[in-house]
Amino acid sequence: MDISVVIPLYNEEESIPELYAWIERVMKANGYSYEVIFVNDGSTDRSWEIIEQLKANSKAVKGIKFRRNYGKSPALFCGFEQAEGEVVITMDADLQDSPDEIPKLYDMITKEGYDLVSGWKQKRYDPLSKTIPTKLFNATARRVSGIKNLHDFNCGLKAYRKAVVKNIEVYGEMHRYIPYLAKNAGFKKIGEKVVQHQARKFGKTKFGGMNRFFNGYLDLITLWFLSTFGIKPMHFFGLLGSLMFILGFISVIIVGVTKLYSMYNGLPYRLVTDSPYFYLSLTAMIIGTQLFLAGFIGELISRNSPERNNYQIEKII
Ligand code: UDP
Ligand code: MG
């Protein structure tokens, strides 16, 4: 099979028939063998009935129904597990992404050797409240992930070599960082293609509000931490803890020396607790020890984690 199209959806009843007809048109015109996997993420409208109807009329349709709304990441992950095509294309269900992009994306994977190609909605038809935070967010993601050539990490339209989707785990709200996940799994050739973008035709966005923004950044920090220190937490906590402890140690020496100096020189007797260095050393040494212990506990957890030795073997000859 050439292509699997994975479409996560949550309450998109108006868009599905039009979207499917359009995909079918593109696939037939290019002679691809394909499947379209709809992952119904707990929709409360008629989305699922519509998918069942499509399924009845076409063998290329697969439908997965979640018992409730879990979010876009689990929906994508589940679609990835089911996908059989050599190239996997993800697409939003709301008709904002154009199926006409499929052939070019397919060629970039199969002919130009990309592992992952992300769409770039260079010209976006979304409200400003969405586009401005997105710019900030992408700039941060570029820096943190080191994938410098991507402008639009969160674009729903992406194409993957099959091996990529089978070797990454998209959980929580990590769908925003799939290129970063792919890079961490060892897939290096990550590219971008400018894609057409439409305004949402039906319904409204499922990712509104400030939460989206903060959660997005917290997830990025988590990913950075996991990919940098995930299997060696002591390198993070140990360093911080040692620095703190050294700071405390230096200031304890200052306290002691000042005390002795004033005693032997007959200066007026002062309590050590009068010195700011006393408090500094106390806090720094306690926090330093705590950080060190956190590092040890982190190591104990990571030793027992199923992912501690999750090296992926690309090929054995
Ligand atoms: N979606 C989903 N589960 C959710 C939220 C969204 O499967 O909990 C789907 C949604 O139906 C759409 C895609 O994810 O197909 C992108 O969502 P949306 O268009 O609301 O995001 P935006 O384009 O506004 O960023
Ligand atoms: Mg949308």
Image (cartoon, rainbow, N blue to C red):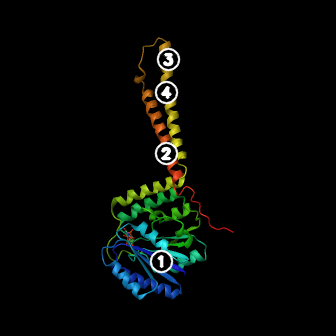
Q: Which residue is mark 2?
A: 297
Q: CA distance from mark 3 to mark 2?
A: 39 Å
Q: Which residue is mark 4?
A: 252
Please name the amino acid that badge 3 sits on.
Leu
Q: CA distance from mark 4 to mark 2?
A: 27 Å
Please name the amino acid that badge 1 sits on.
Val
Q: Are marks 3 and 4 in contact (CB under 8 Å)?
A: no
Which quadrant: the C terminus?
A: bottom right
Dividing the image into four quarters, tell me where ligand 1 lies: bottom left
Does residue 130 appear to the left or right of 115 in the view shown? left
Spot occupied by residue 222 in the image (x, y as percentages of width and height): 46, 54
Does residue 226 appear to the left or right of 172 in the view shown? right
Q: CA distance from mark 3 to mark 4?
A: 12 Å
Looking at marks 3 and 2 on the same chain, the residue that comes earlier in the sequence is marked by 3
Q: Which residue is mark 3?
A: 260
Q: Residues within 10 Å of mark 4 (few under 14, many from 20)?
A: many
